[in-house]
C-alpha cells in the first residue's frame, strides 16, 4: 500500500468532486427524495399516534421500532447511492445494472455496522468500568462522590483526568473511522458485497497511513465546520425572517434553497473524501484514474 500525503489527498478529493459533482447530485439527491418519501409513509402516522397516546408504552415502543427500521432503510439507500457514485467515479460502470448490487451491498453494510456498533458499545462499557476503577484507585471513593461535584470541590487532578479520557475517546474514534474509511470505495471498485471483507481490506490498506488519514479527516472536518459557520452567519438573517410572523411563502422557499446550498457541498465533500483516500493508497491497479 502507498503512504498517503495530505497534499495528494486534498488534490484527489477536489479532483473527484470536480469530475463527479453532477453524478453525486443526481444519485444522492434521488436517495434523499426516496428517504423523505419513505419517512413520510412510515413515520407520519407514528408521531400522530404518539401524540394521541403520550402515556401508552406500547405506542412509544412501536414508534421506536418504526424509527429504527426507517434508520436502517435510510442508511441502506444513502450508502447504496454512495456506492454508485464511487463505482462510477473510480472505475466506471453501468448504473442501471449496479442498482441491485448497490442496494444489496448497502443493506449488508448496514447490518455489519449494527454488529460493529453493538460490539463497540460493549467494549466502551468495559473501558469505562476499567477507567472508573483506575480513577477510584487514584482519587479515592470520596473524591468521586456526588457531593464533591455538586459542591464544586472537584480536584484539579480529577478534572485533568476527565479531559484526558474525553480526548482519548475522540482520538480513538477518529482513528477507527480512518481505519475503516475506504471500505465503501473498496466495495465499489471491486463490486463486492461482503462488508466484513471490505472492513478488513480497509484496515489493511490504511495501516501505513493511519495517522495521516486521521489528520486529513480532521482538516476536512474543520473546513466543513468553518464553511457551515460562515454560511450560517451569512444566511442566518434569512432563517430569522422565516420565523417572523410576516414571512411569506417566497421567503420560506428562498431559505430552503439556501439551506440546500449550504449543506449540499458538505455532503458532496464527505462522499469525495473516502474515494480520494482510496485512490491515494490503492496499489491494486483498479481506480487508477477517476472515470
Image: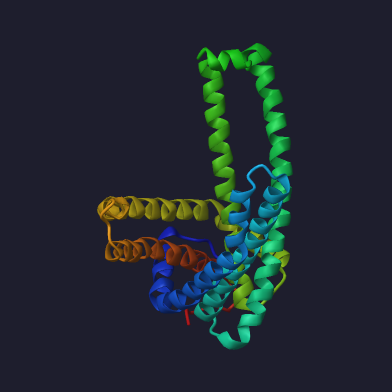
Left or right: residue 232 compared with residue 193: left
Which residue is more in the foreground, 251 or 140? Answer: 251
The answer, for residue 1, to whether it is visible in the render is: no
Quarter of the rendering containing residue 140:
top right
Residue at 52% from the left image edge and 81% from the top image edge: 88
Left or right: residue 179 compared with residue 264: right
- Is 120 located above or below residue 184 in the figure? above
Quarter of the rendering containing residue 188:
bottom right
Return the x and y of residue 207 as percentages of the image width and height: 61, 57
Left or right: residue 86 compared with residue 65: left
Residue extending farthest to the front is 52
Which residue is more in the foreground, 149 or 56? Answer: 56
Residue at 58% from the left image edge and 32% from the top image edge: 165
Residue at 43% from the left image edge and 77% from the top image edge: 20
Return the x and y of residue 71 as percentages of the image width and height: 62, 60
Which residue is more in the foreground, 34 or 51? Answer: 51
Count of numbered labels shown in the rendering: 0
Return the x and y of residue 54 as percentages of the image width and height: 63, 44
- Is 270 located above or below residue 80 in the figure? above
Amino acid at each position: 500500500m502507498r503512504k498517503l500525503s495530505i497534499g495528494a489527498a486534498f488534490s484527489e478529493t477536489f479532483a473527484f468532486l470536480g469530475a463527479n459533482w453532477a453524478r453525486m447530485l443526481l444519485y444522492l439527491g434521488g436517495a434523499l427524495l426516496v428517504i423523505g418519501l419513505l419517512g413520510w409513509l412510515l413515520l407520519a402516522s407514528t408521531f400522530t399516534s404518539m401524540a394521541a397516546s403520550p402515556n401508552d408504552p406500547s405506542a412509544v415502543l412501536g414508534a421506536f421500532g418504526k424509527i429504527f427500521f426507517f434508520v436502517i432503510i435510510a442508511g441502506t439507500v444513502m450508502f447504496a447511492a454512495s456506492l454508485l457514485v464511487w463505482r462510477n467515479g473510480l472505475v466506471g460502470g453501468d448504473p442501471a445494472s449496479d442498482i441491485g448490487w448497490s442496494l444489496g451491498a448497502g443493506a449488508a453494510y448496514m447490518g455489519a455496522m449494527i454488529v460493529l456498533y453493538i460490539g463497540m458499545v460493549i467494549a466502551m462499557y468495559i473501558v469505562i468500568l476499567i477507567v472508573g476503577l483506575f480513577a477510584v484507585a487514584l482519587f479515592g471513593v470520596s473524591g468521586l462522590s456526588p457531593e464533591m461535584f455538586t459542591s464544586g470541590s472537584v480536584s484539579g487532578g480529577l478534572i485533568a483526568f476527565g479531559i484526558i479520557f474525553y480526548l482519548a475517546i475522540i482520538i480513538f474514534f477518529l482513528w477507527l473511522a480512518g481505519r475503516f474509511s475506504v471500505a465503501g470505495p473498496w466495495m465499489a471498485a471491486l463490486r463486492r458485497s461482503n462488508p466484513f471483507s471490505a472492513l478488513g481490506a480497509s484496515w489493511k490498506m490504511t495501516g501505513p497511513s493511519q495517522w495521516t488519514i486521521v489528520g486529513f479527516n480532521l482538516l476536512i472536518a474543520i473546513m466543513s465546520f468553518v464553511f457551515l459557520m460562515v454560511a450560517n452567519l451569512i444566511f442566518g438573517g434569512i432563517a430569522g425572517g422565516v420565523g417572523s410572523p410576516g414571512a411569506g411563502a417566497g421567503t420560506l422557499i428562498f431559505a430552503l434553497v439556501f439551506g440546500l446550498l449550504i449543506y449540499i457541498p458538505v455532503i458532496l465533500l464527505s462522499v469525495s473524501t473516502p474515494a480520494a483516500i482510496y485512490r491515494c493508497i490503492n496499489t491494486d491497479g483498479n481506480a487508477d484514474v477517476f472515470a
